[in-house]
């Protein structure tokens, strides 16, 4: 890597910094931290997309890549860095009707809190316990004691007292899956990193878009959420998996199986659709929503690099940002059109 002043790499680095991306390291230092890496898992394809091939995502060494980010990165505490895992502490959980992500929420959604205290949410007592974020685990395994509260919230958000959450195969269309509830998880934030994101980031609890969620609370278990905490969305397309052998048949891949005191796991069903930064030096885990589509990333990156080559890194930075943004806007799917109405009639969760 050529880090000499005026080199192509340094032009690209300065372009990122001018847009508020990258580190604020001293001039001449590399923005590469060997104690950091980021994973971006592409969402699983539905049967109608398999002809296009299956993408896997992106791995970034030395930090994260803001060109992958659909939302600003927010940071949760790694509450037990000494044991070698990346463990996040869950402070709250909500279900939001009609699906959607943080960056593309559904219209006219309603929120139901999963009424459980922090010990139940994390499957253990104490602020230094939580759920590990594990890239080597396909599914997510949460505390068994959490299931009754989750099922009650599931019934309430679907407005159907018979709608039991389960892990059995179920026949649904892709459009119906997209209208299932989004799971919103509130994680203990990394306090010293909150100045980097503040209330402007949609992943922070203080963002105005979360007001309706917190105003919906009518339960007895108290919440201890602060403005430093973060929100991670798990849309239904991420926790529901379609059978490749039997298209149109789906299964929920979040299981409530772990006994109290055992280690619960957020696997790839939680991770996909995010670039997740594993920052061992700072004791934090970063979350940014992302398409995680490597082919799309390379197209946008090449477009940006070509603009830098043509216009220079310093004289035409605004034009570069505009062109890249235009590409992103053209490819964004309007999720409100997909999940604006309850559409579960005729499915197994009607």
Image (spheres, rainbow, N blue to C red):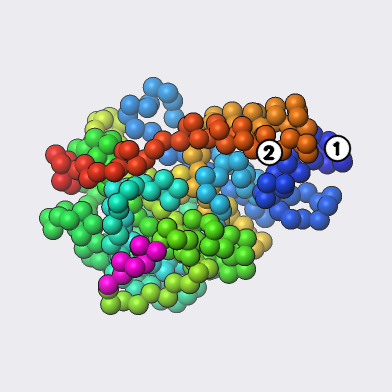
Which residue bears the numbered disc 2? 318
Residue 238's place in the image compared with 198, above or below, is: above
Task: Name the residue beneath numbered marker 1.
Answer: 6
Instruction: Give the extent of the magenta segment.
Output: 211-218
Q: Which class describes the residues within 10 Å of circle 1: few (<14), some (14-19), or many (20+)? A: few
Helix, strand or loop at disc 1? loop
Quadrant of the rendered structure where residue 179 is? top left
The answer to whether residue 275 is seen in the rendering is yes
Residue 138 position in % (x across, y down): 41, 46
Q: Element type at marker 2?
A: helix
Q: Residues within 10 Å of mark 2 (few under 14, many from 20)?
A: few
Q: Residue at x 19, y 43 (%)?
A: 344
Q: Quadrant of residue 246?
A: top left
Q: Are marks 2 and 1 in contact (CB under 8 Å)?
A: no
Which secondary structure class fits the magenta region best? Answer: helix
Name of the residue lying farthest toward the top: 51
Residue at 67% across, 55% down: 35
**Closer mark to the observer between disc 2 and disc 1:** 2
> What is the spatial separation of the Cα atoms under label 2 and label 1, in whole angstroms?
19 Å
When the figure is inspected, residue 316 is found, relative to residue 40, above or below; the finding is above
């Amino acid at each position: 890597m050529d880090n000499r002043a005026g080199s192509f790499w340094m032009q690209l680095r300065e372009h990122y910094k001018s847009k508020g991306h990258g580190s604020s390291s001293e001039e001449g230092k590399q923005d590469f931290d060997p104690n950091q890496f980021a994973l971006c898992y592409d969402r699983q394809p539905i049967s109608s997309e398999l002809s296009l091939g299956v993408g896997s995502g992106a791995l970034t060494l030395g930090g994260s890549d803001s060109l992958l980010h659909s939302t600003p990165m927010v940071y949760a505490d790694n509450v037990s860095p000494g044991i070698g895992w990346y463990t996040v502490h869950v402070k709250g959980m909500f279900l939001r009707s009609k699906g959607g992500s943080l960056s593309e929420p559904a219209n006219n959604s309603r929120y139901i809190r999963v009424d459980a205290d922090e010990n139940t949410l994390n499957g253990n007592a104490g602020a230094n316990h939580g759920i590990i974020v594990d890239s080597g685990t396909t599914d997510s395994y949460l505390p068994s004691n959490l299931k009754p509260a989750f099922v009650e919230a599931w019934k309430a958000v679907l407005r159907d007292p018979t709608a039991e959450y389960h892990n059995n195969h179920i026949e649904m269309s892709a459009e119906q899956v997209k209208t299932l509830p989004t799971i919103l998880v509130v994680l203990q934030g990394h306090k010293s990193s909150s100045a980097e994101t503040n209330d402007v980031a949609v992943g922070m609890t203080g963002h105005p878009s979360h007001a309706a969620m917190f105003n919906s609370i009518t339960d007895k278990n108290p919440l201890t959420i602060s403005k430093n905490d973060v929100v991670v969305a798990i849309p239904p397309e991420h926790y529901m998996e379609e059978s490749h052998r039997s298209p149109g048949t789906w299964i929920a891949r979040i299981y409530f199986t772990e006994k109290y005191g055992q280690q619960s796991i957020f696997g790839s069903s939680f991770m996909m659709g995010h670039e997740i930064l594993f920052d061992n030096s700072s004791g934090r885990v970063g979350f940014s929503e992302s398409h995680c589509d490597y082919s799309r990333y390379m197209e946008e990156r090449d477009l940006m690099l070509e603009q830098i080559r043509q216009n220079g890194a310093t004289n035409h930075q605004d034009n570069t940002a505009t062109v890249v943004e235009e590409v992103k806007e053209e490819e964004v799917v309007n999720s409100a059109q997909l999940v604006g109405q309850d559409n579960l009639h005729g499915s197994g969760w009607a």
